[in-house]
Image: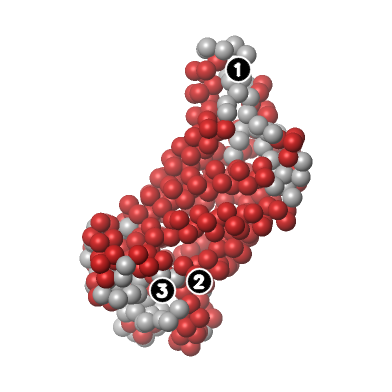
Amino acid sequence: MSLGAAEEDSPSKIHLPADIDWEMLDKSKFFFLGAALFSGVSGTLYPIVVLKTRQQVMLNEISSLKMVSSILKFEGFRGFYRGFGTSLMGTIPARALYMGALEVTKSNVGNVATGQLGLSEASASVISNAAAGLSAAMAAQLVWTPIDVVSQRLMVQGGKGGCNASGCSVGLKTYNGGIDAVRKIMYADGVRGLYRGFGISILTYAPSNAVWWASYSIVHRLIWGCIGCYCCKKDENGYRPDGKAMVGVQGLSAAFASGLSALVTMPFDTIKTRLQVLDVEGSRCGRAPTILQTARNLVKEGGVGACYRGLGPRWASMSMSATTMITTYEFLKRLSTKNEETFA
């Protein structure tokens, strides 16, 4: 997010646009445009998510290039979009919950931190961003977990290049689309089957989002501080960045924050994927394994390194997604302001 008008009084004299809080947004425009923009982002990055998911459920480690080659050879380009329709249906309500919780929490926590607690703008920004990321992830998982369970099962099946032929670590059923998958999951495991891995999803995404937003806030501020110090040596009147500079700093900050977040939470994400993809019938005891059992099985297969299968695609996915998301998000907020000329 932007550092706000308060930066104009800093020693480096960086003149950035004022931040846009929840009260300044036209909510209907915000959610409508947000659904359209982020659906496009999801479609662009979906193939990387498919690649990451398939790597996580394999018995043996397979390189990304080999996996891509296998999918193209046996399934064609459409193999990279298995389950996308189901995923897209969940993206819109999940993103709406995410964005709403993010902005409301950030605005309220930020006001409390600066007003009642008397913290500096920098400290309040880190705390409010971390709290906002935490609450947004928890809210979104109420919708996203069932969609994730269904879409991931569709992702890993398919032709000779699918997991069934490539040595998948879990038993898989064949589904004829999202509706068929929901029906079979409900029949086998009830509603709880659609929420399998909900706990580990919270443990994965809530800390990940908190770390990401806090890291983003810190890195964003540090980069602008360095730029300000350099530019103000040439111009005593301060530095007023253009649109390209704003996007560049946002993207760089997002990529750095994504790398840290992916590294910290990767084992949780791998366990979550295993829990959500495997069938109850495929387990020895005829029931879904626990988080601990899944973790033990994973380590037995390939040691601690098995927990990091798919790290490359996930890191790339998170970095590209976050960079695209934050620049799109900032653009969305400025499009959705009630009085746009104020922030021009």
Between the residue at mark 1 and the residue at mark 3, the CA separation in whole angstroms equals 54 Å
- Ranked by sequence position, the earlier of labels 1 and 2 is 2
Left/right placement of residue 265 relative to residue 13 reads left
Residue 197 position (above or below residue 204): below
Judge whether residue 43 can be spotted in this image: yes
Give the residue pinned by disc 1. 238
Q: Amino acid at mark 1?
A: Gly
Q: Amino acid at mark 2?
A: Thr
Residue 155 position (above or below residue 311): below
Give SS at disc 3.
helix
Is the residue marked by circle 2 packed among few (<14), some (14-19), or many (20+) residues within 10 Å? some
Give the residue pinned by disc 3. 154
> Disc number at residue 86?
2
Give SS at disc 1.
loop
Residue at 47%, 59% (x, y): give it: 43
Give SS at disc 2.
helix
Left/right placement of residue 163 relative to residue 116 reads left
